[in-house]
Amino acid sequence: MRVGRLALVVLCGLVLGGPAAAQTNQAAKGRGPIANTPDQTLTGSAMAVEGDLLTVNGVAVRLMGIDAPDPGQKCKNRYGHELDCFKVATAVLANMVKGEEVTCTVTEQDRTGEKKGECRVRGVDLGAAMVSRGWAFQYASLSPAYQKGEAYAQSKRMGLWAGQVEKPWQWRSRQLREKAK
């Protein structure tokens, strides 16, 4: 249902007002997690800020249901060599959106004002692509949607699964504990 509605909004924007209309915030009466908050659709060029954060026409959107390595987070490759997994994950997402039109359906805005949603390129869910390639982890507590993709990446030892890495939420907790000492 959501994909059909998204396609209809983008198509209407292109037919009625060209690309400029499609880039505006098209709102369909949604069933967002905040009462009376419509889903917001953003379409345009995007830049990867983190492995799970994009800007679409300058508006920041966090990819829902996934968590990618944080700035400063290191991991080890299959040979035991340390690498900056934050930079690699961000570069992977950047390559997926480079030169492509990105469409994000924002379904949530947290208490800090950060927008969260699902973003797609040519119909491909970027969150699913990051997880199935092994450069982000699913947030199982938020959604089981990416469980199969993560199992695939782990079984094939792809991306972060090729070596050693802490899950980002565990890494953040450890950083806080170490700073508190």
Image (cartoon, rainbow, N blue to C red):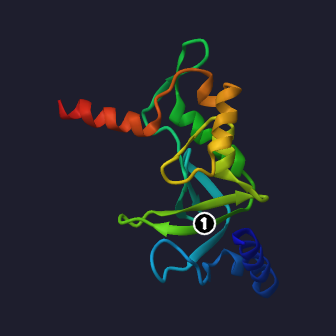
Residue name at image x 47 percent, y 34 percent: 167
Badge 1 is on which residue?
Answer: 57
* Residue that sits furthest to the right in the current view: 15
Q: Is residue 106 positioned above or below 14 on the image?
A: above
* Residue that sits furthest to the top in the current view: 79
At which x and y percent is residue 100? Answer: 75, 56
Residue name at image x 61 percent, y 37 percent: 135
Residue name at image x 50 percent, y 24 percent: 75
Q: Quadrant of residue 178?
A: top left
Quadrant that contains the C terminus = top left
Q: Quadrant of residue 43?
A: bottom right
Q: Is residue 127 positioned above or below 110 on the image?
A: above
At which x and y percent is residue 157? Answer: 67, 25
- Say whether residue 92 is visible: no
In the rendered structure, the answer to whether residue 12 lies left or right of residue 164 reads right
Quadrant that contains the N terminus = bottom right
In the rendered structure, the answer to whether residue 165 lies left or right of residue 179 reads right
| Residue type at the position of mark 1 | Asn
In the rendered structure, the answer to whether residue 175 lies left or right of residue 179 reads right
Q: Is residue 43 positioned above or below 157 on the image?
A: below
At which x and y percent is residue 25? Answer: 60, 78
- Say whether residue 41 is visible: yes
At which x and y percent is residue 82? Answer: 51, 19
Residue name at image x 58 percent, y 41 percent: 90
In the rendered structure, the answer to whether residue 95 lies left or right of residue 115 reads right
